[in-house]
Image: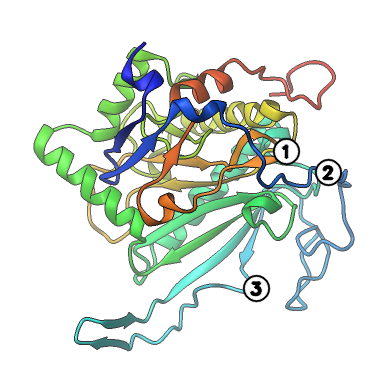
Amino acid sequence: MSLLDNASHRRLNPLTGEWVIVSPHRTARPWRGQEEDLSVVDRPAYDSTCYLCPGNQRANAERNPRYGGVFAFDNDFPALTPDAPPDGLDDNGLLVARGEPGICRVVCFSERHDLTLSRMQVCDIVRVVEAWREEHRRLGALEFIDYVQIFENRGAMMGASNPHPHCQIWATRSLPNEIVKETRSQNDYLTRKKSCLLCDYLALEEKLGERVVCRNDHFTALVPFWAAWPFETMVLPRRHIGAFDDFGGEETYAFAEILRLLTVRYDNLFKSPFPYSMGFHQRPTDRERHPAWHFHAHFYPPLLRSAAVRKFMVGFELLGSPQRDITPEAGARRLRDLPTTHYAESVGDSG
């Protein structure tokens, strides 16, 4: 048995330059901590009290159109506004602040209140992917926007304020912290190796196979070697793509398919709606070329042992480094072995 299977060790995340501690021997420890409320309410296809459902009034008194499919609009309570003043503060490098203009959008995946990506048809997810691409292109073309972050918080455990299937988009003037780190690492790798970091990483993972969860002709979903969360995954295109703008027609469908294959497995893991924060990392929109950037999606789910037991990043993880008990290889194996038919479907595979 190797060091990576049985003994505490740490693994480097080459995208950020940070380390994660892996403690596989701790999987046998007893659990007497918090357990989540598992009560799940069956949701209707339409909810008259939901501010995201078609035809309903939102908190700002605007009324949604009676849309079908994808619906996008400006966030009624945005974290960023385009008219933020540019003034800043710099007191001896100790008290530093800058104005941060931006735009926040909401994208509803479907008019159906009771759906999630895992329960949608691939053809319907394709329309969502097309909406993401269009939002990224339109917002990124604005002179004062240098980055477009698209993300979904699924489930109350991840802070979702509404169960209607939707995501958010925050378009910012500055590059977010994680993007700064990933840009630096990918540029450094290109300079040193004369090749793409994630192209080389994916080729190695495809060869080894032990952390691959699922794949199709254009995309691979895997548990990263350096994953910090128990069932964290990453989705990578199998050719060098920098952003949604570079998707071809077949890749749009294939990306929708891989998202469904992965999210169905998540739900099937504990036979319950699986919470996560998911988002896409792609090249900045600051008018630079960014040849080192390789598009990818991150999925960060909090669940640990069951649908009721979650992983907390506390103590040493807040003050020192992230730590995990289940190895990435074990997490990938559990996800890979799950069926691709959703547990709530009686027969057949609708994807």
Secondary element under disc 3, as helix, strand or loop, is loop
| Horizontal side of residue 135 vs 158, given as left or right | left
The amino acid type, in three-letter code, at marker 1 is: Pro
Q: Which residue is mark 2?
A: 40
Q: Residue furthest left?
A: 192
Pointer 1: residues within 10 angstroms few (<14), some, or many (20+)? Answer: some
| Horizontal side of residue 187 vs 237, given as left or right | left
| Horizontal side of residue 43 vs 243, given as left or right | right
Which quadrant is the N terminus positioned in? Answer: top left
Pointer 3: residues within 10 angstroms few (<14), some, or many (20+)? Answer: some
The amino acid type, in three-letter code, at marker 3 is: Asp
Q: Position of residue 291 (x, y in %)?
A: 22, 43
| Horizontal side of residue 206 vs 264, given as left or right | left
**Tag of residue 273:** 1
Q: Position of residue 346 (x, y in %)?
A: 85, 20
- Which callout, 2 or 1, points at the residue further toward the start of the chain? 2
Q: Residue at x 11, y 41 (%)?
A: 191
Circle 2/circle 1 CB separation < 8 Å:
yes
- Which callout, 3 or 2, points at the residue further toward the start of the chain? 2
Q: Is residue 26 visible?
A: yes
Q: Nearer the viewer, mark 3 or mark 2?
A: 2
Secondary element under disc 1, as helix, strand or loop, is loop
Q: Residue at x 51, y 56 (%)?
A: 135
**Tag of residue 76:** 3
The amino acid type, in three-letter code, at marker 2 is: Val
**Tag of residue 51:** none
Q: Nearer the viewer, mark 1 or mark 3?
A: 1
Q: Residue 291, relative to residue 100: is it above or below? A: above
Q: Residue at x 25, y 26 (%)?
A: 200
Q: Quadrant of residue 7?
A: top left
Between 83 and 23, the one lying in front of the other is: 23
